[in-house]
Image (cartoon, grey):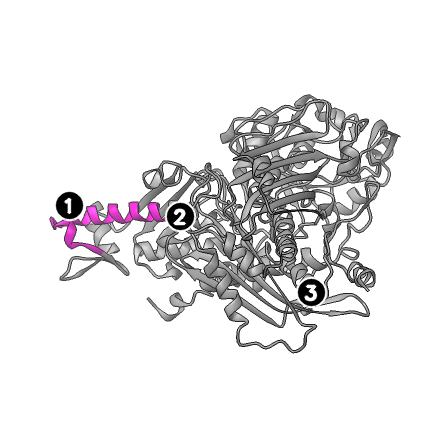
Amino acid sequence: MSAIDNMSSVRPDLIEKVTGRAEYVTDLTVPGMLHGFVVRSPAIHARIASIDSSVARAMDGVVDVLIGEDVASFGNWGVVLKDRPIIATDRVRYVGEPVAVVIAETIEIAENAAELVDVGYDDLPRATTIQEALAEEAPLIHERHENLEDFYFKGGARPTQNTNIFHTYRNNVGDVDAAEATAAYIHEDRFTFPAISHFAMEPHAVIADFQRDSLTVWAGAQTPTAVQKVLSRLFGLQLAKVRVIVPFVGGGFGGKASVKIEPLVAAASWKVQRPVRIAQSIAESMLTCRRLGADITIRTAVDANGRILAKSAKLLLDGGAYSDTGSAVATKAANRIMGPYAVPNLRLEACAVYTNTVPGAAFRSIGGPQAVWAKESHMDNVAAAIGMDPSEFRLRNLASRGERIRPDLRAFDMDMSELMGRVTQSFASEVKASNRQARGLAVAATDPANTPISNAIVRLKIDGSILVSVSSIEVGQGAHATMARIASQTLKQPASAVTVLRTDTAVAPYDWGTGASRSTVVVGLSVENAALDAADQILEMVADVWELPRENLSLVEGGVTTGSEVLTYHQIFHRTLGVDSGEVIGRGAITPRSKKGALVESPLFWETSAGLAEIIVDEDTGEIHVTRYASAADVGRVINRVAAEGQDEGAAIMGLGHALYEVLEFEDGQPVNATPIDYSIPRISDVPPVFDIILVENGDGPGPGGAKGMGEGAILPVAPAIANALFSAYGIRITELPMTPEKVWRALQKRN
């Protein structure tokens, strides 16, 4: 291969982005396209008493106004529970909920006319926090729950009727009470985690073109087949009549997973029978979805030697006004609070709760940041209480490779002590500048990569160029470059010969979607299988037409070698087909039964991470400065090193935002900082000056070449590692994120 093909940093999508050639939804126009602007509720929980859109409709350039009664007959939609109307009909449940869409010739006209839509509200009792929603006399945010079993995730929600709990997950192992009765020490803590905005660079934007019995949608969607399925059922269309096209996507982080504003935009197009585009601002996207907040109580019993005997945890997650994927977030949070520890007795309970706030949704490592924040902070507290070094306490209780932390989960496929050792080693040569320089450690093991179902098509052309078609979405993480590399390595062609097509459900084969660290493993395997299928066909053609033993043939760049000569693809196709043209189409599929059933067990692999933070605190202001951070992950095998390191760096910096800066604040249900001006995220100047990324390769993953998924795990240890550093050197324990200067300063004053 040429030098450029060995440079793992070269990604075609990056070239298109930096040269301005990349086209996002807002760069696209469709003939006859109109523009929609959403009128949003200022009320927290209210009945819609009236909507008067007559003045707006009369405005020049306004084509129509969509309101709830126009589409009420279509019913509700959802991906786990059918609890969401296309647009509010008789009631609004949070500030920012759409109540009307003005559809006009230009966005300026639509936005101006939206101010003329007069909506009357009758306030209803509200429940804006978990505690209010669980109170005995709490108003019901939803009276009914219609479950969609196995619709988007395997399984479904488990709502408690006549309450605001829309999902409860429980898992018990052993006998916690009996273990606690014999324990030398029992420690309990409570932690809270805030709502956090996805804050992707590109807000939600969708174009929909509803043509009688067909619908085409252009969307920055992470899961286009989910969008296709929801729209198909909602509007009574055959799946094949719903086409979802995904151009470039400017970040997702889970906020563009499942389904978001696509039903609303499709309904607007249905109303006017013309294409309609709705492109939200960042502030509007902040009112569309966010990470679920959490209230977590965790309790650990240990013996006299510091071995954990039992652990119990109750997790309450704030799902907001609609369920979205909140049930899965709750379940995953319960699984992820176990950590990489061998605990013989477990009592886990997680509840997702409706509140009158912005709906919660999937967000990088669903449920993980909430759970690991509590679990790893708690581990240091327990270690301190029993007088043991926190690293030693962890090492004493880590599960070993091949050990199961729960009977229903795959045995551990990694060695967490190695990751702990690697991050600690990275600091070994660095001597603390002062005793105020503090260090803290945290580790995590999560269960990603749901739904091992994927398909790929690889087309090998006569000139050796390759087209790869998948429904995996490039959201900036480098997935398409990874797919190209897998295809090129399998077919022995240069990476520059491979083009990965943008996803279009009319032509791309089915895949569950992009998320849960699944692309490299699940989609990568389907691409590898498709490339192997194409290779098999080419080799079979040569063996048949040239009458050569198949075992003597192998692929090389540009064609097939017989051992004595290289036959070019031009020669092969010309002689086989009789004309100088043609292609081979390889098909690859992955199901739970693939790889001799190796993908049946959950999780497909364990995504592991360790983080070590070094901090200094300005005790006059309470400001935390992270001076150094090390992150280690077991990735199985690296396919694209620069992309892999970038993913871990990005995840860790996102974790830094969770730890120190980010919170989507509500005052009695009213969002108070849901704008890019008021919402704090890390700046480049906040990144630790020394930042070590360590990728451990053991080649033992289920993906191509032994790869495992990655890119989510590194977010998890950051907040507890910083909090543990604060605890170890300054003697204060922060239990509520973010660790703002004010919280730290007040804790220091209280300590003094």
Look at the image and say whether residue 681 sits in the magenta stretch: no
Labels 3 & 1 near each other (Cβ < 8 A): no
Residue numbers of the magenta segment: 527-554
Which tag, 2 or 1, sits closer to the chain's start? 2
Q: In this view, does 360 lie above or below 147?
A: below
User: Residue 730's x, y, as percent?
Assistant: 72, 65
Residue at image position (61%, 56%) is: 383
User: Residue 373's x, y, as percent?
Assistant: 64, 51
Residue at image position (63%, 23%) is: 146
Q: What residue type is labelled 2?
A: Gly
Residue carrying label 2: 402
Within 10 Å of disc 1 (Cα), the crowding (few <14, some 14-19, many 20+) is: few
Left or right of 1 on screen, residue 297: right
Q: In which quarter of the image is residue 256?
A: top right
Residue 655 visible? The answer is no
Q: In this view, does 433 lie above or below 167?
A: below
Q: Which is nearer the eye, 444 or 207?
A: 444
Measure the alpha-carbon separation of dots 2 and 3: 41 Å
Which tag, 3 or 1, sits closer to the chain's start? 1
User: Residue 562's x, y, as percent?
Assistant: 16, 57
Look at the image and say whether residue 531 sits in the magenta stretch: yes
Residue at image position (49%, 58%) is: 633
Residue 199 visible? The answer is yes
Q: Which is nearer the eye, 188 or 164?
A: 188
Q: What residue type is labelled 1?
A: Asp
Measure the alpha-carbon separation of dots 2 and 1: 46 Å
Residue 683: which disc?
A: 3
Which tag, 2 or 3, sits closer to the chain's start? 2
User: Residue 679's x, y, as percent?
Assistant: 76, 55
